[in-house]
Image: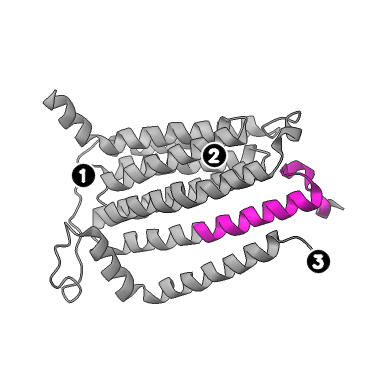
Amino acid sequence: MVNLNAVLLISFLLFSIGIAGVLIRRNALVILMCVELMLNAANLNFIAFARHSGSVSGQAFALLIMGFAAAEVAVGLALVVALYRKRDTVQVDDINLLKG
Amino acid sequence: MEHLLETIGRNMFAIFGVMALCGATFMVAAKSAVHSVLGFLFTMLCVSGCFLALDAEFLGMAQILVYAGGIVVLFLFVVMLVELSKFKEKGVFQLQSRYAVVTVLVGAAAFVAAFRNMIFGASSPEALVLRPELAKGLDVAQQNAQAVSRGLFSDYLLPFEILSVILLVALVGAVVLAKTERV
């Protein structure tokens, strides 16, 4: 049977890779994908705890998080498209309008 | 042969988990955005395999539908829409990337050091249960989708409705943000 700590380790590593991607990539699209990966790691944690406590709440919450992730990616991609129209770039380094 | 299959079946979660980690690493490291999207798709499929190994059948299928069916297609559309070839001359990674990688590795090592005795030890999962008035006429262990829906629509009805409003707002917001100016 699956050990809870093994699940936590996998989910922690997935979350770390997501954070590393957000920190080190320049492409806004890849950054969005890494945010999705972090949400998925959280989902994995919810389901692991649901499995190991016998409660159905974790799975219900994971479903809600999945819906939030879909809403977030829709708005994020719309922002990327608007940004590309306005500034002709999707590299986060080139976006420095607030820098003054 | 039978023994091998049995071993694979017992370690299904670890296999899918390691595959998901490989896909995520490929996603972060790939130079081309299309390769990143393909790595993302592979990772999502493996995570859904992890869900199945954790007895969350409904969520595993929902994961495939939502991510592989919806979000990956959206990402691919935007990648095709945005002309990425003109950014090729710039570096893929930020300047501080080596610090980020070192930080993540140190964090992972600390986690493994703290929990190394417990990762491979015995586990005590418990069977899924519902409150008796909700579980009426239902084999909770076998009918995962029904069990999740009964939990969702009894205890979490308000968050579910709020989520539907949020999805509507996100839909309108995405249309407003992405439409061409001065219509």
In the rendered image, residue A85 lying in the magenta stretch gets the answer yes
Inter-mark Cα distance, 3 to 1:
60 Å
Residue bearing the label numbered 2? B37
Q: Amino acid at mark 3?
A: Arg
Q: Tell me the quadrant of the picture where the C terminus of chain B can be found.
A: bottom right
Identify the residue at image location x=78%, y=47%: A95
Q: Tell me the quadrant of the picture where the N terminus of chain B can be found.
A: top left
Identify the residue at image location x=24%, y=65%: B146
Residue bearing the label numbered 3? B182
Q: Amino acid at mark 1?
A: Ser
In the rendered image, residue B171 lying in the magenta stretch gets the answer no
Q: Amino acid at mark 2?
A: Val
Could you tell me residue A83's position as x and y percent?
Answer: 74, 52
Could you tell me residue A61's position as x and y percent?
Answer: 38, 62
Residue bearing the label numbered 1? B123
Q: Is residue B70 left or right of residue B147?
A: right
- Are both tags, 1 and 2, on one chain? yes
Could you tell me residue B120's position as x and y percent?
Answer: 26, 35
